Amino acid sequence: MSTRISRSAQAPTATPPMAERRSRARRIALPLAVLTALLVSVLAMTTAASAQTRDGDDDGRRNGRGGFRFDCEVSHFNQDDPIVFPDEVGAAHDHMFWGNTSTDAFSTIDSLLANEESTCSGRRDGNQAAYWTPVLYDANGDAVEPTDIDVRYRGRRGVNPIPNGLEMLTTMDVLGAEANDFEINEDDGGMEFEISYPNCLAVDAAGNPVLSSDDNISHTAFSDGRDCPDSHPYRIPRLQIDLEFDLDIDSDWRLSSDMDGMAQGASLHADYMAAWTDDPPGT
């Protein structure tokens, strides 16, 4: 029968310096090995999650990834609106246009595709789409151009290509719209507009996407973040635009579409006409 003696009960013995260093190295090596394994595991999980997101499982309602983006510059200003007032020159409030440089009251899919000039550039070719918003005025009534225009198409898996000729007017009246789809935020002493477009379209009897409607919005809807409503089953990538302005958000500014008595920016909205000469978003 043997008796186990605890280490604390044994008489202390001298440890040679080299042996002591080896002992310390063994004691340190184990925690480092465990820490390294944990870090590798975390990195693997992060990479997998990132890859899944890049594939486009989330259609990109503000926090989605994937898709692609364009940097754009202002093209021109006018009082035309080819969606709300087609063929009527000067019938709308002041608009700021970017993208296709030919956009006016008479713009159609054919005219946009015929014009090769665009103020947007990115890693995808063929973007001849037209984008526009109300004009931002400062306290003196002068138009303020954005210092940056960022256009993003989000969501790549399980979506259909954006059809050429699609007309979209995004407002709070669109089915499924939420307040955070039209945000005006302070941004480093300036201000920023963050606007989302609907990503679900109605279809006709043959199952083809509907490109426009009499009220300009009923053919479109927002998904709930993953699914489209049954009334608008044709899901496309989500288009989002960010406009940055060097203007104090607390100053006396207004939008060209803000009516008398309306809160600043309450009428924020945006328009879009799809025109792609190469593969459109979603392909």
Image (tube, grey):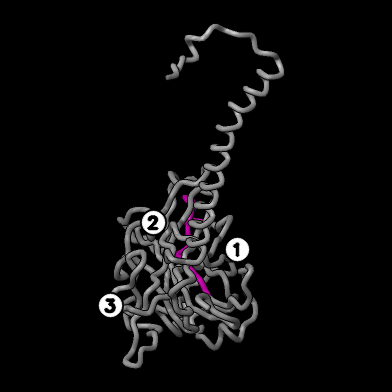
The amino acid type found where label 3 is placed reads: Asp
Does 230 sit left or right of 273 as displayed?
A: left
Task: Determine whether 114 is above or below 239 in the image.
Answer: below
Tell me the CA gap for discs 1 and 3: 34 Å
Image point (58%, 34%), residue name: 32
Foreground residue, 137 or 161?
161
Instruction: Locate residue 178: give its quadrant.
Output: bottom left
Image point (55%, 61%), residue name: 150
Q: Position of residue 14 (x, y in %)?
A: 64, 9
Q: Earlier in the sequence, mark 1 or mark 2?
A: 1
Q: Nearer the viewer, mark 2 or mark 3?
A: 3
Q: Position of residue 213 (x, y in %)?
A: 34, 83
Which stretch is magenta?
130-142
Residue contact between numbered discs 1 and 2, judged by CB atoms under 8 Å: no
Q: Position of residue 128 (x, y in %)?
A: 58, 78
Q: Which SS class for mark 1?
A: strand
Badge 3: residue crowd in 10 Å (few <14, some 14–19, many ≥20): few
Image point (45%, 85%), residue name: 87
Does 92 sit left or right of 120 as displayed?
A: left
Does 203 sit left or right of 34 as displayed?
A: left
Does the magenta portion include 91?
A: no
Does the magenta portion include 140?
A: yes
Q: Which SS class for mark 3?
A: loop
Foreground residue, 165 or 270?
165
Foreground residue, 226 or 98?
226
The residue tagged 3 is 230
The residue tagged 2 is 265
Image point (43%, 48%), residue name: 252
Checking the image for residue 71, the label placed there is: 1
Badge 1: residue crowd in 10 Å (few <14, some 14–19, many ≥20): some
